[in-house]
C-alpha cells in the first residue's frame, strides 16, 4: 500500500521511530557535551593542582635557601589557581560575566576549545550532586590559597630567611606543609567528584540509550509480531514492577518477610536477614525454625503512682534459636488470592533503641542528674508505697539539710557546691546502704527513707541518723587547698506517727528546721508529745494560710481611738490602725494567732506593705471628709525597719494617693528599734524627712529604754500597757509611768498610755500628765472601711 509523506498512517508508524532516534541523538550529543565539559574540568584540575604544587614547591625552596628568584616562580605558579578562582567567582556572581570567566580560564592554561564547556557545565550543572561536591572542594581551596599567599608575604618579610637556620626552615616548612596537605585533600576530593560525575553521566547515557533501543525494538516487533510484542511488554512491565518492589523493600529499615501459603520464607529484605539470620539467606525455610514471638511485662527502672503493672501493655520479643532476644513490634498482613490464603507479610521493627531511650528517660525522671540519687518524685513515690502498705511497717523518714551550704556555694562557686553535694551524697549512700533509700530532694536537702529490717544489729533510726550526722561532721570538704568543715541538721520522724505522705514530709521538715534553730549539727526526732514541734507545726500551717489570706483579700483593718487628755490637744484625736484576718469561714482571727508565724517565716514585709497601702487608701478618702483625724498610727515590724526599699515604697504611695505626710505616724516597738538601732535611726530619719511622725510602742520593756530614747528621733512614746493597767495597785508601776512621762516631756515628746481599761485609770493618768490615752475605756477597736466599702456594708 502506497503511503505519501502526508499520510497520517505513515507518520503514526514512522513518527515514534523518528522521535526516538532524534531523542537518542539529542541525548547522545548532550551527553558527549557533558562528558567533554567534565573532561575539560579534569584537564583544568591538572593545571590547577600543578599550579598549587609548583607554588608550594617554590615556596619550600625559598624558605630553605632564601633565594628571592623562587618567590617570582611562586608568583607565576600561584597565578594559575588564582585565575581559576577569578573565573569561578565571576560565574557565581549575579549578572553575565562570561567574558571575565573566559579570560580567567584562559590565564589558567585551559585550551580555548574547552573554555566554553567549562562555563556551560558550571552554569547549568553546578547544583547537581557530584558537580556540586567538586565546586565545594574548589571553593574551599580559596581560604587555603589566601593562607599560602599570606605565608609567602610573611616569609618574604622574615629577615631570618636571608640566612635560614634549621629551626626557621622547619617552622616555615610545617606551615607550608599544613596548607599543602589541605590543598591535596581538596584536589583529591575535586577529582573524586569529577570522576563520579563522569561515571554517573556514562551510566545514565548507557541506560537511556538502552531504554530507547528497547523502545525502538519494541515498536518494530509491534509491527511484526503484535501478539508477541504485547506479551513481551507485559513481562517487561512485570519485571520492572518486581524490581521496583524489591528495591523498595530492600531500602526499608524494618525487617520485611513474605511467606508462602505453607508459611515458608519466600522473601526477606536485607534488614530481616541481618536481624534474624545474621545476613544469611533463609529463603524456603519455615518461619518457625527462624524465630518465635514471645511476650513479657515491661521492666522499667521508674515506677509512678499512676502506673499499674497490670495495665501496661507487655512488650514483644523476637526469640532466635540460640535463645537471644530482641524487643520488637510486629505488624502482620495476610495475603489472599481469590479468597484463598496465599501467605502473609510480616513487618518487624527492632525496638532496641526505643527501649534503651525509654529506660534512659525513666532513669532521668526518677534520679537526680548531679548526684545519681533518687529525686524528689521517686522519693515521694517510694514513701507513698511504703505508707500504703501494712499499718505496722517499721519505717522512718529523715530529712537532711546541709548547714551553711550557701556560704560554700557563694565563696567557692557553684561548681564547688556541686562537688560538695556529690561528696555528701556518696557519704549518705554509703552509710545507709541497702537499709534504705537516699534521695536528693532539691538544693542542699536530702531525704532518707529507712525501711524495716536494717541489718543484723537492728539499729534504730536514731542510731543511723546520729551516725550519719557524725560521719558528715568528721568529713572535710577541700577546695583549692582550703578545707571546710561541714555539718548537717537532721529531722527524723516515724512513719507510724504520720497521717500521710505530705504530713510525714511536713513533720520531718519541721524537725529539721527545729534542729537548725537549736544550733545546727544535730538530730531532731519528732515525737507527738514534743511541744516545740507542735508549735512549729502550727506556725508552719499558718504560712500557707497567711499567703492565701493575702491572695484572697481576707485581711482587714480595725481602728481604735487615741484620745487627747489635755484640753490643749482638743481636736487632735488620733487613730491606731490594727490588723485583723478572717479565716476561710469568715471568722475573725486575732493578730496574736498568725503574726508570730509571719515574723518567723519572713512574711512580715508582705503584710506590712499590704497594711500601709490599705492605710493610705483609707487616709486618702478621709482627707476630704468632715471627720477630722489628726493622725493615723500604722504599725511596722522589725523586719521592715531593715528594708531599704520600703522608704521608696512609701514615697511612691505618697505620690499615688496624695496623702499629707502629717497624717501618717509609723509605730515601731522599742525592742525592734533597739535590736536594729543603727538601721532604725536611718529609717526614722528618712521617713521624717518626708514629713511622717514616729511613735515608739511598748516603751519601758527594755533594760536601756531611757538611754536609747535620746538617740531615737521619735515624736510619741507609747508606755507599755503592762505598767498602765496596774497603775492603781502598784506604786512601782505608777512611778514608772510618771518617770517615763516626765522624761518624755523634757525631751519634748508626747506620751500615749495604752490599756486604759477604766475611768479611774484615766483620771490617774490625767494627774500624771500623759498626753493621749488608748484603751477599752476610750473606745474598742472597730472595723474601718473605705467610703466604697461603707456603701456596700
Image (cartoon, grey):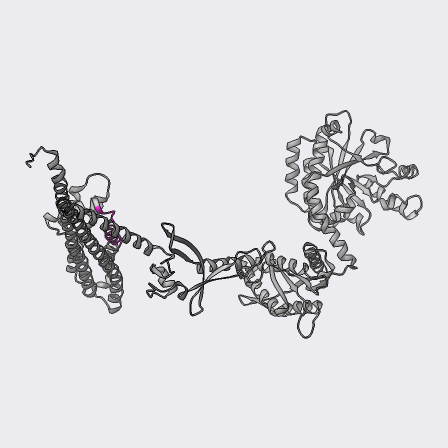
Number of marks: 0
48 or 226, nearer to the observer? 226
| Image position of 464 with respect to 220: above or below | below
Residue 270: x and y in percent read: 33, 60
Residue 401 colored magenta? Answer: no
237 or 297, nearer to the observer? 237
The image quarter containing residue 587 is top right
Residue 442 visible? The answer is no
Residue 241 visible? The answer is yes
Residue at 70 percent across and 67 percent down: it is 461
Which residue is the extreme one toward the bottom?
456
Q: Quadrant of the C terminus?
A: top right
* Segment colored magenta: 125-143
Q: Is residue 369 left or right of residue 291?
A: right
Residue 141 colored magenta? Answer: yes
Residue 153: x and y in percent read: 23, 56
The image quarter containing residue 395 is bottom right
Q: Quadrant of the N terminus?
A: top left
Residue at 73 percent across and 42 percent down: it is 636
Q: Is residue 228 left or right of residue 665?
A: left
- Our reading of the magenta stretch's main secondary structure is helix
Q: Is residue 76 left or right of residue 450?
A: left
Residue 706: x and y in percent read: 80, 47
Residue 388: x and y in percent read: 67, 58
411 or 281, nearer to the observer? 281
25 or 118, nearer to the observer? 25
Amino acid at each position: 500500500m502506497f503511503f505519501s509523506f502526508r499520510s497520517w498512517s505513515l507518520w503514526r508508524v514512522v513518527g515514534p521511530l523518528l522521535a526516538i532516534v532524534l531523542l537518542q541523538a539529542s541525548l547522545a550529543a548532550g551527553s558527549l557535551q557533558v562528558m567533554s565539559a567534565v573532561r575539560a574540568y579534569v584537564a583544568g584540575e591538572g593545571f590547577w593542582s600543578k599550579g598549587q604544587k609548583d607554588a608550594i614547591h617554590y615556596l619550600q625552596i625559598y624558605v630553605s635557601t632564601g633565594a628571592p628568584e623562587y618567590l617570582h616562580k611562586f608568583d607565576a605558579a600561584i597565578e594559575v589557581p588564582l585565575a581559576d578562582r577569578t573565573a569561578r567567582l565571576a560565574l557565581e556572581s549575579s549578572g553575565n560575566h562570561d567574558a571575565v570567566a573566559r579570560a580567567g580560564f584562559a590565564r589558567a592554561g585551559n585550551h580555548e576549545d574547552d573554555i566554553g564547556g567549562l562555563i556551560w557545565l558550571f552554569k547549568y550543572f553546578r547544583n547537581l550532586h557530584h558537580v556540586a561536591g567538586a565546586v565545594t572542594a574548589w571553593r574551599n581551596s580559596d581560604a587555603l590559597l589566601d593562607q599560602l599567599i599570606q605565608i609567602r608575604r610573611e616569609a618574604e618579610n622574615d629577615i631570618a630567611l636571608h640566612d635560614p637556620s634549621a629551626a626557621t626552615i622547619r617552622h616555615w616548612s610545617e606551615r607550608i606543609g599544613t596548607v599543602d596537605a589541605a590543598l591535596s585533600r581538596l584536589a583529591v576530593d575535586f577529582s573524586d567528584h569529577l570522576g563520579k560525575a563522569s561515571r554517573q553521566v556514562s551510566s545514565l547515557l548507557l541506560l537511556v540509550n538502552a531504554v530507547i533501543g528497547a523502545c525502538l525494538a519494541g515498536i518494530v516487533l509491534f509491527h511484526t509480531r503484535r501478539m508477541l510484542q504485547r506479551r513481551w511488554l507485559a513481562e517487561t512491565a512485570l519485571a520492572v514492577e518486581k524490581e521496583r518492589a524489591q528495591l523498595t523493600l530492600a531500602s526499608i529499615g524494618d525487617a520485611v518477610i513474605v511467606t508462602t501459603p505453607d508459611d515458608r520464607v519466600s522473601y526477606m529484605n536485607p534488614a530481616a536477614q541481618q536481624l534474624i539470620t545474621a545476613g544469611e539467606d533463609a529463603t524456603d525455610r519455615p518461619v518457625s525454625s527462624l524465630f518465635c514471638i514471645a511476650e513479657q511485662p515491661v521492666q522499667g527502672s521508674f515506677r509512678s503512682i499512676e502506673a499499674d503493672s497490670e495495665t501496661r501493655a507487655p512488650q514483644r520479643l523476637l526469640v532466635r534459636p540460640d535463645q537471644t532476644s530482641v524487643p520488637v513490634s510486629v505488624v502482620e498482613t495476610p495475603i489472599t488470592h481469590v479468597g484463598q490464603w496465599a501467605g502473609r507479610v510480616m513487618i518487624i521493627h527492632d525496638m532496641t533503641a526505643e527501649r534503651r531511650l525509654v529506660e534512659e528517660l525513666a532513669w532521668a525522671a526518677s534520679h537526680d542528674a548531679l548526684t545519681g540519687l533518687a529525686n524528689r518524685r521517686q522519693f515521694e513515690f517510694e514513701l507513698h508505697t511504703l505508707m500504703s502498705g501494712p499499718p505496722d511497717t517499721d519505717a522512718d523518714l529523715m530529712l537532711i539539710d546541709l548547714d551553711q551550704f550557701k556560704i560554700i556555694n557563694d565563696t567557692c562557686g557553684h561548681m564547688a557546691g556541686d562537688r560538695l553535694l556529690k561528696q555528701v551524697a556518696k557519704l549518705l549512700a554509703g552509710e545507709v546502704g541497702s537499709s534504705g533509700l537516699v534521695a536528693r530532694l532539691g538544693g542542699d536537702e536530702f531525704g532518707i527513707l529507712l525501711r524495716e529490717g536494717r541489718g543484723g544489729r537492728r539499729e534504730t533510726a536514731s542510731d543511723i541518723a546520729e551516725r550519719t550526722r557524725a560521719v558528715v561532721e568528721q568529713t572535710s570538704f577541700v577546695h583549692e587547698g582550703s578545707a571546710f568543715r561541714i555539718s548537717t541538721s537532721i529531722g527524723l520522724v516515724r512513719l507510724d506517727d504520720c497521717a500521710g505522705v505530705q504530713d510525714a514530709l511536713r513533720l520531718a521538715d519541721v524537725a529539721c528546721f527545729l534542729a537548725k534553730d537549736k544550733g545546727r549539727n544535730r538530730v531532731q526526732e519528732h515525737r507527738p508529745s514534743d511541744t516545740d514541734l507542735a508549735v512549729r507545726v502550727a506556725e508552719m500551717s499558718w504560712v500557707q494560710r497567711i499567703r492565701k489570706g493575702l491572695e484572697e483579700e481576707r485581711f482587714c483593718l480595725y481602728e481604735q481611738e487615741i484620745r487627747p487628755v489635755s484640753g490643749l490637744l482638743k481636736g487632735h484625736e488620733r487613730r491606731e490602725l490594727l490588723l485583723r484576718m478572717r479565716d476561710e469561714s469568715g471568722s475573725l482571727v486575732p493578730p496574736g494567732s498568725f503574726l508570730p508565724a509571719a515574723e518567723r517565716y519572713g512574711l512580715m514585709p508582705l503584710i506590712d506593705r499590704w497594711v500601709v497601702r490599705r492605710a493610705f487608701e483609707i487616709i486618702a478618702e478621709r482627707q476630704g471628709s468632715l471627720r477630722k483625724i489628726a493622725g493615723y498610727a500604722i504599725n511596722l515590724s522589725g523586719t521592715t525597719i531593715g528594708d531599704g526599699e520600703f522608704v521608696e515604697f512609701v514615697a511612691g504611695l505618697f505620690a499615688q494617693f496624695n496623702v499629707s505626710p502629717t497624717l501618717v505616724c509609723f509605730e515601731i516597738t522599742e525592742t525592734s528599734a533597739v535590736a536594729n538601732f543603727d538601721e532604725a535611726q536611718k529609717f526614722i530619719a528618712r521617713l521624717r524627712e518626708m514629713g511622717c511622725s514616729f511613735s515608739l510602742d511598748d516603751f519601758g520593756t527594755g533594760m536601756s529604754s531611757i538611754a536609747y530614747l535620746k538617740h531615737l528621733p521619735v515624736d510619741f512614746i507609747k508606755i507599755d500597757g503592762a505598767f498602765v493597767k496596774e497603775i492603781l495597785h502598784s506604786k512601782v508601776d505608777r512611778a514608772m509611768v510618771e518617770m517615763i512621762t516626765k522624761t518624755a516631756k523634757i525631751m519634748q515628746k508626747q506620751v500615749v498610755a495604752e490599756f486604759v481599761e477604766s475611768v479611774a485609770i484615766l483620771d490617774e493618768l490625767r494627774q500624771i500628765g500623759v498626753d493621749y490615752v488608748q484603751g477599752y475605756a476610750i473606745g474598742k477597736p472597730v472595723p474601718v472601711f473605705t467610703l466604697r466599702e461603707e456603701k456596700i456594708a
